[in-house]
Image (cartoon, grey):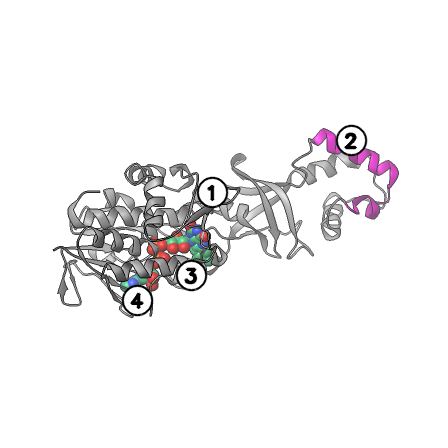
């Protein structure tokens, strides 16, 4: 019987342990925390957005590499795996897939039951540091080892390459799926206010991302799911000059909005009244200050107002800190792990966020954790899937 060690009991480690044990291996999970699966509990605001109905490698930082795994472990295989532990799944209107219970604790409990059924040994409170003898952990020898230690997102910890001493390379890591710090031209008095808008991200004047969604204004910048996704593309365009543009009237053309505003200015030329019911009061003051509007709206002001309402620009200063991020951009270099197997250490595999793979919001990161975990677990037993 093959002896497999899994280092890290998160989504990827649990998936790999279950698949390896189902193939008849003796599996041990080593987890540094006092219990496994802690992070799963906080995903999707406690509802656990497990996967997505539209899985596409293009939604990741590293599409070619992700594709090479998703061609082997298809979306239907991941769904089948999740269902095989007892989960019933449902998708919302946007394709985000949740357990029907909408409780992340259900997901954890289903996995714990399955690990127990398969007699997977779980050793908690054990932080493992691999050395060049990668098969030997705490004096025990394993046939193969799966590294699924995750990364530092949502913590204050500094990233340390877990395989530094083994000369396996990692990239720098950055916070991703995280709010953005921007210039404050349109932010005064706006903290906590939400608008529905079309967000576009521009890098060196080229549009690199667009999404309709709810934007949450913060005193430091912008937040909300569309902004989190924009942070992913901000990281991919790190060396460019980037800004976010918000279209606050996405359902109207500029011409239609201008025609409506001309009429409005004729009826209520007083600047304060003109904006009343159009945008939030503090937003109106920010726009007025930016455009240096007088106390009355002139017909000649309307074009500039339309331009701001349909293209409100926020220059990006940086992302917020790692402790506000859902995932990291970066990690172990994927070319060190073709098909998730280490080039330098044939008995070492990697899965999940430990690798330099990250995706958009919507279940894509857990999907990567399940799919890579499933594949690594199967490979570690007998090189087949
Ligand atoms: C607030 C929040 C919400 C999220 N919501 C979603 C969502 O709804 N949908 C989605 O797809 N993604 C979501 N994500 C991202 C998703 O949770 C992660 O991408 C995913 O959990 C990564 O799984 P993993 O197994 O690779 O790593 P992790 O879940 O981080 O697991 C790694 C495990 O390894 C352990 N470990 C680390 N080092 C060692 C060591 N040396 N020895 C032993 N054990 C070690 C850790 O304690 C941890 O238990 C969210 C993330 C956050 C922070």
Disc 3 versus disc 2: nearer the observer: 3
Disc 4: CA contacts within 10 A as few (<14), some (14-19) or many (>=20): some
Report the disc number at residue 32: 4
Residue at the spot of label 3: 105
- Residue drawn at x 63%, y 45% is 196
Does 261 appear in magenta? yes
- Residue drawn at x 60%, y 48% is 215
Label whose residue precedes the other's in the sequence (3 or 4): 4
The quadrant of the picture showing ligand 1 is bottom left
Disc 1: CA contacts within 10 A as few (<14), some (14-19) or many (>=20): many
Disc 2 versus disc 4: nearer the observer: 4
Label whose residue precedes the other's in the sequence (4 or 1): 4
Q: For residue 114, what is the image quadrant?
A: bottom left
Q: Which residues are magenta?
A: 254-277
Label whose residue precedes the other's in the sequence (3 or 2): 3
Report the disc number at residue 259: 2
């Amino acid at each position: 019987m093959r002896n497999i060690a899994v280092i890290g009991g998160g989504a990827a480690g649990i998936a790999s342990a279950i698949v390896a044990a189902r193939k008849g291996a003796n599996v041990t999970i080593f987890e540094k925390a006092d219990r496994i699966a802690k992070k799963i509990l906080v995903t999707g605001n406690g509802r656990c957005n497990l996967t997505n109905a539209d899985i596409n490698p293009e939604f990741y930082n590293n599409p070619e590499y992700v594709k090479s795994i998703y061609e082997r472990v298809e979306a239907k295989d991941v769904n089948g795996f999740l269902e095989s532990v007892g989960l019933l799944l449902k998708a919302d209107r946007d394709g985000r897939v949740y357990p029907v219970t909408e409780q992340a604790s259900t997901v954890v409990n289903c996995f714990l039951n399955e690990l127990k059924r398969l007699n997977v040994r779980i050793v908690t409170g054990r932080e493992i540091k691999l050395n060049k003898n990668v098969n030997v952990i705490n004096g025990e020898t394993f046939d193969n080892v799966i590294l699924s230690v995750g990364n530092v997102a949502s913590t204050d910890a500094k990233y340390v390459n877990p395989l530094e001493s083994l000369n396996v390379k990692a990239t720098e890591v950055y916070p991703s799926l995280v709010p953005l710090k921007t210039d404050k031209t349109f932010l005064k008095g706006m903290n906590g206010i939400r608008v529905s808008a079309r967000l576009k991200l521009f890098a060196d004047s080229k549009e690199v991302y667009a999404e309709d969604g709810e934007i949450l204004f913060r005193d430091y910048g912008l937040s909300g799911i569309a902004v989190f996704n924009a942070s992913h593309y901000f990281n991919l365009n790190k060396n460019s000059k980037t800004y976010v543009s918000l279209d606050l009237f996405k359902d109207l053309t500029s011409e239609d909005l201008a025609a409506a505003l001309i009429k409005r200015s004729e009826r209520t030329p007083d600047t304060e009244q003109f904006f009343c019911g159009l945008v939030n009061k503090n937003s109106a003051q920010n726009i007025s200050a930016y455009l240096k509007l007088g106390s009355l709206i002139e017909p000649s002001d309307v074009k500039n107002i339309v331009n701001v309402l349909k293209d409100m620009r926020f220059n990006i200063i940086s992302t917020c800190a790692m402790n506000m991020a859902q995932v990291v951009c970066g990690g172990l270099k994927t070319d060190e792990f073709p098909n998730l197997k280490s080039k330098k250490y044939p008995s070492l595999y990697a899965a999940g966020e430990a690798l330099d793979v990250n995706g958009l919001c919507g279940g894509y990161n857990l999907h990567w954790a399940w799919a890579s975990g499933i594949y690594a677990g199967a490979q570690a037993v007998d090189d087949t899937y």
